[in-house]
Image (cartoon, helix red, strand yellow):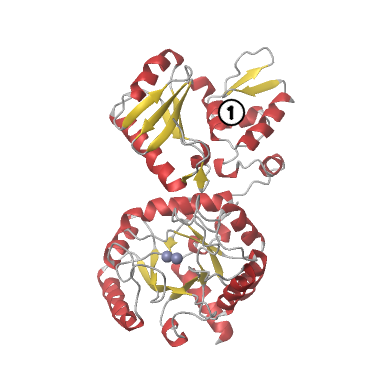
Amino acid sequence: MGQGAILIPLGRAHVLASMIMREARRAAIRVDALTAVGGLRRYEPAVESVAIVAVAPDSERRALLTEFTRLPFVLKSETPGDRSVALATERGDLTIHLTSPGQAGAALVWHTGSSRHVDLLQARAHARDLELVDARLKNRDGKPVPCPSEDDLYRRLDLPFIAPELRAGADEIVAAERGELPELVTEVNIRGDLHMHSTWSDGRDSAEEIVLAARQLGYEYVAITDHSRRAFASHTLAVEDVPRQREEIERLRSRIHGIDILHGIEVDMLTDGSLDFEDEVLEGFDIVLASLHVGGGQDGHRLTARYLEAIRHPLVNVITHPANRSPARSPGFDVDFDALFAAAADTGTAMEIDGAPGHLDMDGAVARRAAAAGVMVTIDSDCHRALWLARQMRFGVGTARRGWIEPKHVLNTGSVDDVRAFVARKRGRHG
Ligand SMILES: [Zn+2]
Ligand SMILES: [Zn+2]
């Protein structure tokens, strides 16, 4: 079982773990808690393996391991020890680790990783006459030290709780020690979604269906941002259709209350550095997102120049998925992010953290540099189906948290008036 080092994209890993947890609940498997762990919990764009920690009393362990092997969709199973079971399912492989309630905190931290973060914690444990080994915390005599929650484990190591997305094994422990951990953005902070596609381009649902779904999620505003005509998408918005789309959005505004609708566009940057729509057309939108979907074989230097041109354009408000990468498949463009960030901060242009599992871009590390450079970021779903609005926003928020992003760094934690003012400021500066 297992495919070795082949990486699993976050989206697929999430589907698999969610499926098994749903089936376990349906089968009424008697566990206190189930938590997806590993890279999935840390929102790694692509993960090495999928794992779940199940909390249950030791006396139940044997029986539970068997129950997991009998879940629907399980094709094959292996029980390498008495604490875990490896399942091969129709959607891929995953492992379930069992832990007792008294050691749940240690098991969650252990199996969530990263391995470098756990290494650092082990060293800290050692310095306190403790051992963090095999998903358990023990004292020097090998006796278990109770840590039912992750909070308990960190407290034993004289640290505050460190959010899973921060557990990279970099500088998070030093920051925690100094009381300098960020106040991470959460989904609750997100007041609107500024990037999504309707049937006017390659989206699956109508603008109306998307707006209604967004209102259901509690958003105060959305921007409908279809692809401009020359984007490499299966269906794009022709310039002739822009007035008709605007009329439809006007109709929706008069019919659907309780949510503001911005008429936006995701306009392509063309190979020669210009934008796919003329300025007169772009001026008619409430917000303009610009993206570089196709490198056209150009090197990093030339691509950076194309981005800089778009960033300096008075009508461009957000640069979407700037690396244009694809997790587990392509690393994306080799652009000079620091040059992009300096220009974005200078011109009042936002840079996007795109939650579509095919993007997850800017990724955490790059997003952290953007915020440090004073760039406003957006966190968007880039949704092509109303059904995925929440899921993709969650991936976007997880990716942002990997980049130590706080609410104050994010444009769409503000009100719709804040968003409109952000657009107006850049236009005004040049108008
Ligand atoms: Zn795009
Ligand atoms: Zn898009």
| Quadrant location of the C terminus in the rendered image | bottom right
Q: Is residue 185 visible?
A: no
The quarter of the displayed image where residue 229 is located: bottom left
Q: Is residue 151 visible?
A: yes
Residue 99 image position (x, y, % from top left): 48, 22
Task: Report the residue at 31% width, 54% height from top.
Answer: 387
- Residue where numbered disc 1 is placed: 152
Residue 10 image position (x, y, % from top left): 46, 46
Q: Is residue 346 above or below residue 371?
A: below
Which residue is situated farthest in the front direction here? 297
Task: Report the residue at 33% width, 29% height from top.
Answer: 75
Which residue is situated farthest in the right direction here? 127
The quarter of the displayed image where residue 388 is located: bottom left
Q: Amino acid at mark 1?
A: Asp
Task: Report the residue at 36% width, 24% height from top.
Answer: 68
Residue 247 image position (x, y, % from top left): 28, 79
Answer with the quadrant where ligand 2 appears in the image.
bottom left
Residue 425 image position (x, y, % from top left): 55, 78
Q: Is residue 158 above or below residue 266?
A: above
The quarter of the displayed image where residue 428 is located: bottom right
| Quadrant location of the N terminus in the rendered image | top left
Q: Is residue 273 above or below residue 39?
A: below
Secondary element under disc 1, as helix, strand or loop, is helix
- In the picture, measured across the screen, residue 306 lies left or right of residue 243, that is right
The residue nearer to you, when weighing 312 against 230, is: 230
- In the picture, measured across the screen, residue 347 lies left or right of residue 22, that is right
